Amino acid sequence: KNSEVDAKNFYSIYGKENIEAAIKDLEKSDEEILNTYSVQAMKAAVAGKIARKRVQRERLVAKLDYLSKHDDLTELYNRRFVIQYLENIVWHSRDRYYMFMFTIDDLKALGDSFGHVVADRIVCNVAHALWETVNEGVGECGARYGEETFLFIMAADSDVEAFMRADAFREKISGFIWNNTPDVRISISGGIVPCRDENEFDRERLLKKVDALLDGFKSRGKNQVRIFMDVG
């Protein structure tokens, strides 16, 4: 009678189905048990491999997505991305945005004089300074637009504010000190165009105008920033 009570307690604690399954396992031969665990191990191994492949694929997709949007030398956004950014973000509220396109003065001559490694370092340092200046929280964007050309999509409340920010950036670049190559002196020249022009609905046409204005500004002197009020 006591054994029947103990059995009932045993079943209630551990569950009748679990106990019966355990008894069936005891009745299996060693070979059957080994095969069962081998299948389970194989399933676990396959599941682990699938999980690792999924992680590798996700990492590869993320890397390809990053490379498609960023310049490989400076890691700033590239020309392709910034054009998409103009269309998807800026063009919907463009009254508050300005395009500041600037170029590193005499970069080719600097490369010829000091070597391409130094020229690349100059490009990267200017890119880093731009990255520090950009405020993505208010919708700004910085990109490498060409070999020595950069585009800063700037948010500003007025033409004066846009000019002051761009000129402060110019002064920051001209103040760079190169410890390893003290003879290197760099500067930038650029032009600012407001995105608010009602006569321009095509971002690429406006970019071409900014590019043309930049060439015009450079012919008037280096190490300076100009703002163009009327792009019509």
Image: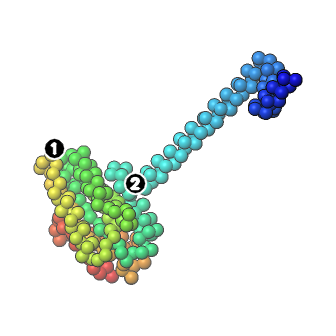
Give the quadrant of the N terminus.
top right
State the residue position of label 2: 70
Q: Is residue 160 left or right of residue 80?
A: left
Residue depicted at 53% across the width and 46% down the height: 58
Residue depicted at 20% across the width and 60% down the height: 172
**227 relative to 65, above or below:** below
Q: Nearer the viewer, residue 101 or 11?
A: 11
Q: Nearer the viewer, residue 24 or 228?
A: 24
Marks 1 & 2, CB-CB < 8 Å contact: no
Residue depicted at 31% across the width and 57% down the height: 131
Say which quarter of the image contains residue 86: bottom left
Say which quarter of the image contains residue 5: top right
**Residue type at numbered disc 2:** His
**Where does the image place residue 145, in percent across and percent down from the top left?**
34, 61
Give the quadrant of the C terminus.
bottom left
**Where does the image place residue 143, in percent across and percent down from the top left?**
35, 60
Q: Is residue 217 left or right of residue 67?
A: left
**Residue type at numbered disc 1:** Asn
Say if residue 85 shows up in the picture: yes
State the residue position of label 1: 180
**Where does the image place residue 35, in percent across and percent down from the top left?**
75, 23
How far separated are the C-alphas under marks 1 and 2? 28 Å
**159 relative to 153, above or below:** below
Say if residue 209 shows up in the picture: no
Q: Nearer the viewer, residue 219 or 119?
A: 119
Residue 121: numbered disc: none
